[in-house]
Amino acid sequence: MKKISILLLTLFLAFSCSDNLEDLNKDTKNATVAAGETFFTGAQKNMVDYMASINVNRNVWRQFAQQVTATTYPEEANYNITDRKIPDNLWAAMYRDVLKDLDESAKVLTATPTVGTAGATKLKNQLAIIEVMNVYAYATLVETFGNIPYTDALDFNNVLPKYDDGKTVYVDLIARLSAAITKMDAAGASFGSADIVYGGNVGKWKKFANSFKLRMGLMIYDADATLGASTVSSAITSGVFTSNGDNALFQYLNSTPNTNPMWVDLVQSGRLDFVAAAPMVNAMNGLNDPRVNVFYKDPVGGVIKGAPYGANNSYALFSHIGSMFYESTLPHVLLDYANVKFMLAEAAERSLGGMTPTAAEAHYNAAITASFDYNQQTYNSLKSPSITLNAAAYLAQPSVAYTTAAGTWKQKIGTQKWIALYNQGFNAWTEFRRLDYPALVAPGTGVVNVVPRRFTYPIGEHTLNGTNYTSAASAVGGDLLTTKLFWDKF
């Protein structure tokens, strides 16, 4: 009995030393709250993983741009995006996995004390970069769906968010982006190695923000010429990409879970779901474009052969996605110099940013050259033997040269941009919708008779947020694949 009493007394004294018995359940050796930088890194990876994926359950943009087409399961190439709930998956990825992580990152960083002037500058830069990524994510949603939850978004206590007008959101995003640019101090620090795109280089982020602002200005120009013109001019004046060294690239690693999602979908899965699509292959072959042998592999009869888009194709009868896209460490491009130069060519044709149409040819040539250089460099860094892509010889062809190529400036720029945006499915599909070139044709077996102009809203919104969904569907002109969004005027 004496021993039991001593033991009970010892336990009592041990427990009484704590003000709160629940403290005994705390793991003092492991963090229970994530750092703001961790949320930021997670948001970056979630964003790019979705953009880079080629999985038919997640990302069908390469197929919509007719860069590749399906084999056994051609539903998505025929624009059936509801069976696999592709809109639902995009919606969740952007709101839950990207925007919410960015929101948490900003909250945690703001609540963390800074040290001195350098610390205050670092925080200011971090919050500005987070804001740039917020704009990128929201812009993706607006450009895909139209009206979206915005002012009510990210409030998990509000399970029935209202939808905001797409144009109103886009105008606000441009303002937010402009404000973020002015807050960046290139002499200060930001996220360091937690930033997997630019390694914390604030100057690079500022160029990216201006380049994306240029894109947004051109996107809205046909809907609001005054705002579009001022946005384009402001972006150019502040400083956009000037070389491939400015490209926004997400560098993947050679070990899971940090490999390029394409490697997971094309190699690790062992599936043979995709072949080269005839529309792009035929266009490139017709222009004697040497990039066709980088973008695709496995010639048939000595040439790259594309399959009929949307058909139930045999993998063995057609060429396939190029070998460098099977590499686990392939970086994914969010925005590149070639795209920016094409945008500057367009701005010149529209007489924006202090330019005149006479400047368009030089930007067009630089855009194509940048695409050749980037693909050559990337291929040679991943594959052997090395290749050489001769942009000068390509540009010398009358069918490619700006002064002699067929069509209007929209056709010339639109066609060459479509080619240069290979493997940037979302950008390729969006630029096709905006410029209407090249003249892609829907397959006869498609669920609609035109290439989709938008995604339909998630099925989950129909059932869980029905009143607001119904209002939004009506406001955009009908929740249809064929409905043109506010910026898609022609």
Image (spheres, rainbow, N blue to C red):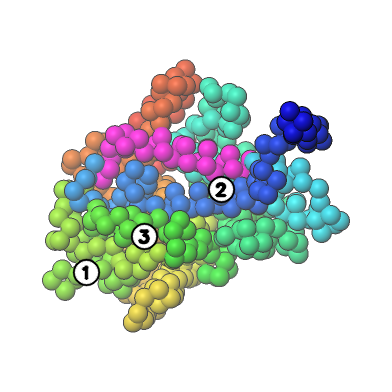
The image position of residue 180, as x and y in percent, is 69, 49
Locate residue 408, reporting x and y percent.
37, 57
Image: magenta residue range: 76-103
Q: Which residue is mark 2?
A: 43
Q: Of label 2 and label 3, which has the lower sequence position?
A: 2
Comparing labels 3 and 1, the label whose residue is closer to the camera: 3
Tell me, yes or no, if residue 465 can be seen here.
yes
Q: Secondary structure at mark 2?
A: helix
Q: Quick one: label 3 or label 1, which is nearer the N terminus?
A: 3
**Residue drawn at point x = 59 percent, y = 43 percent:** 101
Q: Kindly identify the amino acid type of the residue bearing the numbered disc 1.
A: Asp
Where 24 sits versus 197, above or below? above
Depth check: 485 or 257 in front?
A: 257
Residue indicated by mark 1: 298
Label 1: how many Cα within 10 Å (few below 14, some 14–19, many 20+): some
Task: Please state which amino acid type lies under the numbered disc 3.
Answer: Trp
In percent of the image, x 53 and y 27: which residue is there? 163
Please give the residue where the numbered disc 3 appears in the rendered image: 263
Secondary structure type for disc 3: helix
- Real-space CA distance between mark 1 and mark 2, rounded to the nearest whole angstrom: 36 Å
